[in-house]
Image: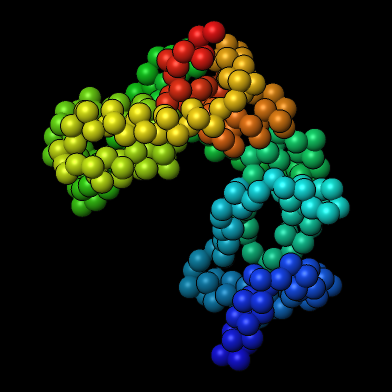
Amino acid sequence: MELQLGLAKVTAKTKQSASMRAKLRGFLEARTDSITDSINDEILEPAVRELKKKGKEGLVVIADNLDRIHNKPKPSGRNQPEYIFVDRGEQLKRLNCHLLYTLPLTLLFSNDASELNGRFGVKPKNLSMVPVQSRHGEPCEPGLELLRQMVMARAFPELTPDERPDKIGEVFGNPEVLDRLCMISGGHVRNLISFLFSCLQKEDTPLPEDILDEVIQEYRDDLVKKITPDEWELLREVRQNRQVAGEDGCQILLRSMFVFEYQDKDGIWFDINPLLAGMDQLQS
């Protein structure tokens, strides 16, 4: 309790004082190796031993949401993701268990991508959007079916996948509304759930199509007002060649969710966020 209370006091102070945060970082950085050794000796290795006694293979630690680290430069000139995953990559590997880190997508487009691979000894896995259509524009039925199941599983978790389609009418006015919801999400799971939640805030089930139209327009308006003329030009290029090039393109288009990344048997390709499809600015 004394330790927790002490840390709470330190945390409260650092929120109000940049100089205190700098002092705390300086204090901890010199002790990073000893802190890591303590975590290994006192937490991870005993946990792994106990898990193996129970017939498990070991322990996997997932460090999620690190993909949201802001791409701001540090005083040294290095961007935050590069500093954490490249400069300090060896320290991230020192925990004695299986590790899964989420990465900012900008790292995969940066000049440090090769060094990143060398630091961790493995090429990062890239999780693309769930495909709702092919790179040639045809609907992708397997991807759409997965999204339909995800929506219906939230409404009827106790039912089997084969039983859920019979319940679509209880959630949506007609099956076409569910399909449009899946298509407009572009296969971006968080967006899909956000659209659905916004619809439910406006109307009870079964959800009519006009409510979905209203929600789509609200999200479209929010997205469009962020796009500059230069960015519209980049979007027209993506629509034409299905590619995003360089760290700047990634930072502007992907992080802002103007463009989504997909993958098929022919490799990686990109497409415009479906919210923007049909906009006059893309036709110029």
Q: Position of residue 223 (x, y in %)?
A: 48, 32
Quarter holding the C terminus is top right
Can see residue 17?
A: yes
Which quarter of the picture shows residue 25?
A: bottom right
Hey, which residue is sitting farthest top in the picture? 284
When the figure is inspected, residue 168 is found, relative to residue 138, above or below; the finding is below
Coloring basis for residues: rainbow
Give whichever of 251, 211 is nearer the camera.
211
At 80% from the left and 73% from the top, the residue drawn is 23
At 64% from the left and 70% from the top, the residue drawn is 15
**Does residue 277 appear left or right of residue 100 in this picture?**
left
Quarter holding the N terminus is bottom right
At 56% from the left and 58% from the top, the residue drawn is 62
When the figure is inspected, residue 75 is found, relative to residue 6, above or below; the finding is above
**Does residue 143 appear left or right of residue 54 in this picture?**
left
**Does residue 33 appear left or right of residue 61 in this picture?**
right
Q: Position of residue 55 (x, y in %)?
A: 49, 68
Which quarter of the picture shows residue 189?
A: top left
Q: Position of residue 26 (x, y in %)?
A: 82, 71
Give whichever of 156, 41 is nearer the camera.
156
Hey, which residue is sitting farthest bottom in the picture? 2
At 42% from the left and 30% from the top, the residue drawn is 221
**Does residue 16 appear left or right of residue 135 in this picture?**
right
